[in-house]
Image: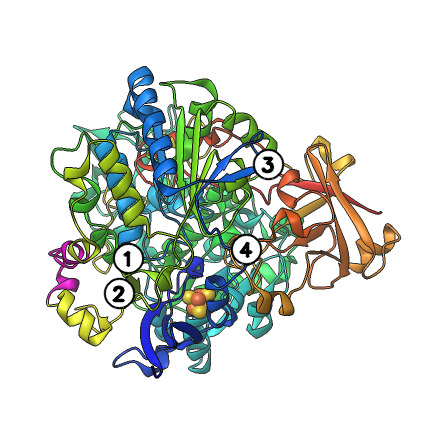
């Protein structure tokens, strides 16, 4: 048989680019993977080393080949090969037993994740959870590494995910990439950014490491990790004190004019309506009945002293002049001053926040302050502006992917649905719930395409939590660190061995099965369906993959109009029925907040002292933590182009590029410790230690060390960097703002990873 061409998307899509791929097959074997064209947009064609190497995932000798049952202790690595019949029968019997004893919510399902590309593969696990009546606290999207960003956006702008299409950068005079390294992790986005730069936009990168994106920038702002809130405050200080804020915008679209009472810090209300001071009438008025509200000053209304929220903001930022911000951030005061003035003068200017901004304890303060910075300069809701979150959307309609995550598939009619853990729709209280058995016992966990024991931090904590579970099942392609702690491991297919649909930017891609499943692997749809049959739930699982695809495409979302399965099968890659103009967030400057405005003043956060922007040190600060005496170095775990999250660590071609884990350490810190290039070193703190080689690297600032994120435990001489991390089972105990109303409603916003908030010491071994 000659060469056959199949279309698909990249399996390493934790970078969220979902590049369209052509999979070339000869004699039933994939021999090459290359980029595919996007109809009408040839410039969008993209592939990186991970995509190019993706066939090596399929033929990897270490792939899980058949179901396995644990015969030793959890984590001991002793397994017995069993049949699918025995595996699914064992799981079904145990689930029935647990349901009888503890109720259906005693099962939690974690379906999908970065490696599980494909809309159907991700949804069918949720369908199973809802049909079974399992709790909803462990759905996909947990362990979100950028949760601080949607949490901040929810608080200030009323919606978690919002922002401008990447192509909108072409309209920007200045682009600030805050905590993002797309040159390594998101190539298509980087291409758009460079196009905007070629068109004249000034590119500024804010982040502690001189990375590949910083190397392409006009200006790199090296910042002490976890101090972004202070940098934004310093910039606001310059902009406000020198009068470069957008007065009309602040008056019209923010709570800036709202009067705040001196006595209780609440907005001054009359008949439920917030009052402002009308400058023309020199009297208080409801905020919607005047066009001339005061932004500054102090007033007395019926004996109550009050000030506009903007006046309070001015007073707050006056505490953070550039010199003060410099002392916190390590960014020179003059640099802060210049950056602030340039940003204010460069309208429209875009801020794009990403994961690097969101991985310390108080990171949502930094994200909030970046959004406020954009608001006071009038950059929100305008073409070329914005303070975009990692996932974008116009802030008004549900994002396209959310609509395609069709509720008909996840919540079939008649299914009992979920019983969430109160106060969260996500993991925030989940681990603590398993540990404590409250509010109800959780005794079984089925994890599909997730690797929480590696991705989420300190292993000992999770090992202890796993001991509360009577059944742990992992569905995956490889024996991950999490799979090692399972009772039963089931081999999944790769995306080249099954059909599905994926969403790549504005395009839908038909993911085509290119080869038959290798070994005894099965697609997720089959695994969940067969398990459901054994549990008497077969009537909910009579659909084929083709049926599910039709349901998806019948989403009624205007963007999917006219895209039938027949069309997708014929054309392979179809542009969503979407206007060509790029999406911008809040085009009408209407915000889904309680006031309808940008809420930089937060009554809900008065108790936490966070009603106004503020900087708070991270959990383990080299400045304020008692631990810093023994552990003076901040540990980063940044992303490298050869990994996607914890995937691809075992792929040969990629390991030729980045062969082994190394500790990046600045020569200043290395010399002080007698460490030379390639020396073996121990990185340690009270929680654990990891042994690896040292790489003297001036791209890492003094006081900070880095180990690239994604390496597997067996690749270290000893330990793993996660052994150094925190163990925080219930994040709301350390980040109280996660417990507030708008945040707890959001799937992602309640999940935070805070592994970068971690102090260590290094010594030569
Ligand atoms: S890893 Fe990301 S950028 Fe690279 S090919 Fe895959 S989807 Fe594209």
Please tell me how crowded label 3 is: few (under 14), some (14-19), or many (20+) other residues with Cα within 10 Å.
Answer: many
Q: Which of marks 3 and 4 is in front?
A: 4
For the residues bearing labels 3 and 1, Cβ distance under 8 angstroms: no
Q: Which of marks 4 and 2 is in front?
A: 4
Of labels 3 and 1, the one closer to you = 3
Residues at badges 4 and 2 in contact (C-beta under 8 Å)?
no
Residue position marked by numbered label 4 in the rendering: 62
How much space separates mark 4 and mark 2, taking CA atoms? 43 Å
Residue highlighted by disc 3: 458
Q: Which mark is residue 583?
A: 2
Q: Residue 350's spot in the image, x, y percent?
A: 40, 64
Label 4: how many Cα within 10 Å (few below 14, some 14–19, many 20+): few
69 left or right of 122 in image? right
Residue beneath label 1, please? Answer: 393
Report the side of 506 relative to 724 (left or right): left
The mark that comes first in sequence, 4 or 2, is: 4
Residue at image location 15% in from the left, 71% down from the top: 567
Left or right: 433 as drawn, with respect to 327: left
Residue 442 location, quadrant: top left
> Looking at the image, which residue sits at the far top?
101
- Looking at the image, the residue that sits furthest to the right is 674
Q: Do the residues labelled 1 and 2 touch (CB within 8 Å)?
A: yes
Mark 3 and mark 4 lie on one chain; the one further toward the N terminus is 4
In the image, is residue 205 part of the stretch drawn in magenta? no
Q: Check mark 1 vs ligand 1: CB closer than 8 Å? yes or no.
A: no
Mark 2 is surrounded, within 10 Å at the Cα level, by few (under 14), some (14 to 19) or many (20 or more) other residues, namely many
Name the front one of labels 2 and 3. Answer: 3
């Amino acid at each position: 048989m000659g060469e056959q061409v199949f279309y698909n998307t990249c399996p390493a899509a934790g970078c969220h680019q979902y590049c369209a791929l052509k999979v070339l097959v000869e004699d039933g074997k994939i021999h090459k993977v290359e980029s595919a064209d996007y109809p009408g947009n040839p410039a969008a064609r993209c592939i990186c080393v991970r995509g190019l190497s993706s066939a090596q995932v399929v033929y990897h000798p270490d792939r899980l080949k058949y179901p396995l049952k644990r015969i030793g202790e959890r984590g001991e690595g002793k397994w017995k090969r069993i049949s699918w019949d025995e595996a699914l029968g064992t799981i079904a019997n145990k689930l029935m037993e647990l349901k009888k004893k503890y109720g259906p919510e005693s099962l939690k399902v974690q379906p999908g994740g970065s490696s599980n590309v494909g809309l159907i593969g991700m949804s069918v696990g949720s369908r199973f959870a809802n049909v079974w009546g399992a709790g909803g606290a462990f759905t996909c999207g947990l362990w979100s590494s950028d949760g601080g960003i949607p949490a901040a956006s929810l608080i200030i702008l009323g919606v978690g995910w919002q922002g401008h299409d990447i192509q909108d950068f072409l309209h920007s005079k200045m682009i600030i990439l805050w905590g993002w390294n797309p040159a390594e992790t998101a190539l298509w986005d980087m291409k758009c950014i460079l196009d905007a730069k070629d068109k004249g936009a000034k590119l500024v990168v804010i982040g502690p490491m001189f990375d590949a994106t910083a190397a392409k920038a006009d200006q790199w702002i090296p910042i002490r990790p976890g101090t972004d809130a202070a940098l934004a405050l310093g910039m606001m200080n310059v902009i406000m004190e020198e009068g470069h804020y957008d007065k009309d915008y602040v008056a019209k679209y923010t709570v800036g004019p709202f009067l705040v009472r001196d006595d209780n810090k609440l907005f001054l209300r009359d008949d439920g309506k917030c009052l402002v001071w009308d400058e023309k009438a020199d009297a208080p008025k409801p905020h919607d009945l005047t066009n001339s509200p005061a932004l500054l000053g102090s007033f007395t209304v019926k004996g109550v002293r009050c000030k506009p929220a903007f006046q309070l903001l001015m007073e707050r930022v006056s505490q953070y002049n550039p010199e003060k911000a410099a002392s916190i951030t390590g960014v020179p005061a003059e640099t802060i001053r210049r950056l602030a003035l340039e940003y204010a003068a460069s309208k429209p200017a875009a801020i794009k926040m990403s994961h690097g901004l969101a991985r310390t304890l108080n990171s949502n303060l930094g994200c909030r302050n970046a959004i406020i910075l954009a608001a006071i300069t009038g950059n929100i809701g305008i073409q070329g502006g914005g303070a975009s979150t990692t996932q974008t959307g116009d802030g008004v309609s549900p994002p396209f992917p959310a609509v395609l995550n069709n509720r008909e598939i996840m919540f079939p009619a008649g299914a009992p649905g979920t019983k969430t853990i109160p106060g969260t729709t996500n993991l925030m209280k989940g681990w603590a719930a398993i540990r404590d058995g409250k509010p109800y016992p959780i005794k079984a966990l089925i994890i599909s395409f997730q690797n929480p024991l590696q991705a989420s931090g300190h292993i000992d904590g999770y090992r202890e939590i796993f001991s509360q579970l009577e059944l742990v099942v992992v569905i995956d392609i490889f024996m991950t660190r999490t799979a090692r702690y399972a009772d039963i491991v089931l081999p999944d297919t790769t995306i080249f061995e099954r059909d599905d649909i994926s969403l790549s930017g504005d395009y839908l891609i038909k993911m085509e099965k290119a080869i038959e499943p290798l070994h005894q692997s099965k697609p997720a749809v089959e695994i969940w369906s067969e398990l459901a049959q054994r549990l008497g739930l077969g009537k909910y699982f009579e659909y084929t993959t083709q049926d599910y695809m039709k349901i998806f495409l019948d989403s009624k979302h205007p963007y999917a109009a006219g895209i039938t399965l027949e069309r997708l099968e014929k054309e392979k890659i179809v542009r969503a029925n979407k206007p060509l103009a790029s999406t911008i967030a809040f085009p009408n400057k209407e915000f889904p907040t309680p006031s309808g405005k940008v809420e930089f003043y937060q009554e809900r956060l008065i108790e936490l002292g966070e009603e106004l922007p503020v900087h708070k040190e991270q959990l383990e600060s080299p400045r304020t933590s008692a631990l810093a005496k023994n552990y003076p170095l901040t540990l980063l775990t940044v992303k490298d182009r050869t990994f996607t999250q914890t995937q691809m660590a075992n792929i040969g071609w990629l390991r030729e590029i980045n062969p082994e884990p190394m500790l990046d350490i600045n020569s200043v810190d290395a010399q002080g410790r007698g460490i030379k290039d390639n020396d073996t070193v121990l990185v340690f703190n009270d929680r654990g230690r990891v042994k690896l080689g040292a790489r003297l690297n001036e791209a890492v600032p003094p006081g900070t060390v880095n180990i690239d994120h994604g390496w597997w435990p067996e690749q270290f001489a000893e330990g793993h960097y996660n052994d150094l991390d925190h163990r925080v089972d219930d994040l709301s105990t350390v980040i109280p703002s996660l417990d507030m109303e708008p945040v707890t409603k959001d799937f992602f916003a309640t999940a935070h990873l805070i592994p970068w908030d971690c102090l260590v010491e290094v010594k030569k071994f």
